[in-house]
Image (spheres, rainbow, N blue to C red):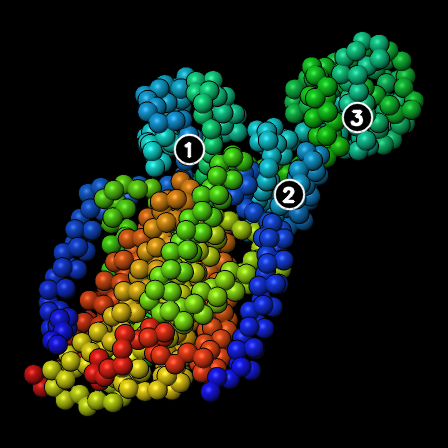
């Protein structure tokens, strides 16, 4: 039986990934990121008002206590939750007023959640989050360079960064709010798709021991075989993880919906990039000096 | 020949595990402290601010923390968490508070109490001169709520009353005149009453504030998060429900795909969950929503470890090896991959803990625990159980181990 040749079609995968990445970067620049109060100082009020509520009524309620919301969004699975964003960090007195006016104007309201963050804290948090992601990337490169070789490490990390870019740009495109748990989701995705990549790299390394690589064709065959030998594992693992993350997305409460959404798309795209990108970068790099 | 000793060992372990888990799991689970996002409550971050004549010192922050704790205790909140972050920040986490507004007011209020001369400026005595035994009572004659206070130095108070006999001595709280009683007589016992509160509850709040004393430094609210109790419980319920269903589906998936090893993996998965619960309870780790999500995801990782091994076993079958040597070789060959994959995840989680804060840290802790637990159950226990099954010679057909049929050539 002739197998589908993944490795020799790598130009297609590269172009596809490049296209997606470019579209992602454009989306980010055009739409911008919808940063939550964790990263952008201000106040966020979340409250369940029941489906079909009027956002103008919410604005009016806030206007009656002299607050101008930046934006009022409809959230939740059934569109029953209002998320109100204010640019300023409110005072405790204003918070009391919000509590009061919501109870007055929307007697059905429940699950009021008020978060407010000062600019200093917001700045610190976003710095810490960026450091965490960078540190994780460096840690992974170091470990893989020791266990494998630098080419594997760099190829793996490039494909990882592409996954991160993809998830961030989907969030930009859909204007989903980015908060601290999003960073946690990103790091899980990074950790998990490096899992996938390492399983494949391990198999390539193992097969390398038993074969002599003289030509580019030898190399391509080797990687193709390794990919197909691990394919069933790659697919089965994605299935189980998609079951977990998907159910968290569908059933898990509103506060982790964004988190599980990031996981869901990140894990699926992570599997794609492990199979179609990471090892192909390695092939393109490694083939130098080999006969065509 | 069937080796019954192996089967008995295996059954013994299973009976022991299920007996232990069945009797203790629920108790352990309910003993895990839940984070604010799961049970409702509020989280406020304060910054201690320097005053004109006092820069913020470590001792000053500690003293402010203790003063806040006194005030929180006056609220009667169970298990408040008041911690110092960085050089000048204090984080207050209160779970299950009904009136968050009131709690915030009591925590943040400077409560500077002063007794001032009739000119309204000269400070005669302050809250520091009071004993911490202020009480709210209803005045027996007027029925109005009053706060009784007692001075540490009765003589000092007597002197004041003597000097200003017949004149009003204002009681000022946070630069607001709350009562302006005229001194009718010289009071020698150091006892006084503060009137002017509208309800007994207000009087009680004032008494609490007086007892807790003034904060050594003014504090500024940097960030706050409030979660309603019902919202937190709903989130917990929803996430658990998602977990149960995910669990059931993964169970079925493993059974269909890997049969006997799948069953072993499922049992190991139950052990993983039990171990996680025990570790959380044992270390007193607070479970938050992202933490819970990390654990449910950990199930996926634990399953992956088994899938890697079982696919490897299938490869060995395909190469025409016997059942026993396939299982041994498959497990052996998959180990480096599993270790590499888990160490990278561990590195990522550790760095997340190191550089992150708050909920991200909670997530990292849960991830580290779940990686270690999955290593113990999905690698060590699961392998050992599978070997017992294989060595017992009870099942000989490779079909039961997930191989389609005996054939070669799939992998070279």
In the rendered view, does B203 fall on the left or right side of A272? right
**Front residue (pair B304, A155):** B304
Residue with the mark numbered 1: A46
Q: Is residue B281 visible?
A: no
In the rendered view, does B255 fall on the left or right side of B58? left
Residue with the mark numbered 2: B80
**Front residue (pair B321, B126):** B321
Q: Residues within 10 Å of mark 2 (few under 14, many from 20)?
A: some
Q: Position of residue B144 (x, y in %)?
A: 76, 12
For image coordinates 58% across by 42% down, the residue present is B93
Residue with the mark numbered 3: B135
Which chain is home to disc 3? B
Q: Position of residue B348 (x, y in %)?
A: 41, 64
Q: Is residue A221 visible?
A: yes
Which chain is home to disc 2? B
Q: CA distance from mark 3 to mark 1?
A: 39 Å
For image coordinates 39% across by 44% down, the residue present is A251
Above or below, comparing residue A81 to residue A268 in the picture: above
For image coordinates 19% across by 56% down, the residue present is A21
Q: Which dot marks residue A84?
A: none
Above or below, comparing residue B165 to residue A94 in the picture: above
In the rendered view, does B338 fall on the left or right side of A284? right
Whether the residues at callouts 3 and 2 have beta carbons within 8 Å, the answer is no
User: Is label 1 in a helix, a strand or a loop?
Assistant: strand
User: Is label 2 in a helix, a strand or a loop?
Assistant: loop
Which chain is home to disc 1? A
């Amino acid at each position: 039986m002739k197998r589908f040749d993944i490795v020799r079609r790598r130009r297609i995968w590269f172009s596809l990934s490049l296209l997606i990445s470019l579209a992602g970067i454009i989306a980010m620049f055009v739409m911008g990121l919808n940063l939550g109060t964790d990263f952008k100082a201000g106040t966020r009020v979340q409250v369940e008002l029941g489906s079909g509520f009027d956002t103008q009524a919410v604005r009016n309620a806030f206007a009656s206590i002299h607050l101008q919301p930046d934006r009022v969004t409809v959230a939740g699975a059934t569109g029953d939750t209002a998320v109100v964003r204010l640019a300023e960090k409110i005072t405790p007195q204003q918070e009391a007023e919000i509590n009061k006016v919501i109870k007055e104007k929307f007697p059905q309201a429940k699950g009021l959640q008020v978060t407010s963050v000062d600019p200093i804290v917001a700045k610190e948090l976003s710095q810490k989050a960026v450091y965490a992601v960078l540190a994780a990337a460096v840690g992974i490169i170091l470990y893989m360079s020791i266990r494998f070789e630098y080419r594997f490490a760099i190829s793996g990390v490039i494909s990882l960064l592409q996954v991160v870019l993809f998830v961030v740009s989907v969030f930009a495109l859909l204007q989903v709010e980015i908060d601290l748990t999003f960073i946690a989701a990103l790091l899980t995705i990074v950790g998990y798709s490096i899992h996938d990549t390492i399983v494949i790299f391990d198999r390539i390394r193992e097969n390398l021991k038993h074969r002599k690589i003289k030509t580019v064709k030898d190399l391509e065959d080797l990687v193709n075989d390794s990919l197909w030998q691990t394919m069933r594992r790659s697919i089965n693992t994605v299935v189980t993880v998609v079951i977990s993350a998907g159910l968290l997305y569908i059933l898990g409460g509103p506060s982790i919906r964004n988190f599980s959404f990031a996981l869901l798309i990140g894990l699926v795209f992570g599997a794609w990039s492990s199979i179609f990108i990471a090892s192909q970068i390695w092939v393109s790099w490694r083939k130098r000096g080999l006969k065509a | 020949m069937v080796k019954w000793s192996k089967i008995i060992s295996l059954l013994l372990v299973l009976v022991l595990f299920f007996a232990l888990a069945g009797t203790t799991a629920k108790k352990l689970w309910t003993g895990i402290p839940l984070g604010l996002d799961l049970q409702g409550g509020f989280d406020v971050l304060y910054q201690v601010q320097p005053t004109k004549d006092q820069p913020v010192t470590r001792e000053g922050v500690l003293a402010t923390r203790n003063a806040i704790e006194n005030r929180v205790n006056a609220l009667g909140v169970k298990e408040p968490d008041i911690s110092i972050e960085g050089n000048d920040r204090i984080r207050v986490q209160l779970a299950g508070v009904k009136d968050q507004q009131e709690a915030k007011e009591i925590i943040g209020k400077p409560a500077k109490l002063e007794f001032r001369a009739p000119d309204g400026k000269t400070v005669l005595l302050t809250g520091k001169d009071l004993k911490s035994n202020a009480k709210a009572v209803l005045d027996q004659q007027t029925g109005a709520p009053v706060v009784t206070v007692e001075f540490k130095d009765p003589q000092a108070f007597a002197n004041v009353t003597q000097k200003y006999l017949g004149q009003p001595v204002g009681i000022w709280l946070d630069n607001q005149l709350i009562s302006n009683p005229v001194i009718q007589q010289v009071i020698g016992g150091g006892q006084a009453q503060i009137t002017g509160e509208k309800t007994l509850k207000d009087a009680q709040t004032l008494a609490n504030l007086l007892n807790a004393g003034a904060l050594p430094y003014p504090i500024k609210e940097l960030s706050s998060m409030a979660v309603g109790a019902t919202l937190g419980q709903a989130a917990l319920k929803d996430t658990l429900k998602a977990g149960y269903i995910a669990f059931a589906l993964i169970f079925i998936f493993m059974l269909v795909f890997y049969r006997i090893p799948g069953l072993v993996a499922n049992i190991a998965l139950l052990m993983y969950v039990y171990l996680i619960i025990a570790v959380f309870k044992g270390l007193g780790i607070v479970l938050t929503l992202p933490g819970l999500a990390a654990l449910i995801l950990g199930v996926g990782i634990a399953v992956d470890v088994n899938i890697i091994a079982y696919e490897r076993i299938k490869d060995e079958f395909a190469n025409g090896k016997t059942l026993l040597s396939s299982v041994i070789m498959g497990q052996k060959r998959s180990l480096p991959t599993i270790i590499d994959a888990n160490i990278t995840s561990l590195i990522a989680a550790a760095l997340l803990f190191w550089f992150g804060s708050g909920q991200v840290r909670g997530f990292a802790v849960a991830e580290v625990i779940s990686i270690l637990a999955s290593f113990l159950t999905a690698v060590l226990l699961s392998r050992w159980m599978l070997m017992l099954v294989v060595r017992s010679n009870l099942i000989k057909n490779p079909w039961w181990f997930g191989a389609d049929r005996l054939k070669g050539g799939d992998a070279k």
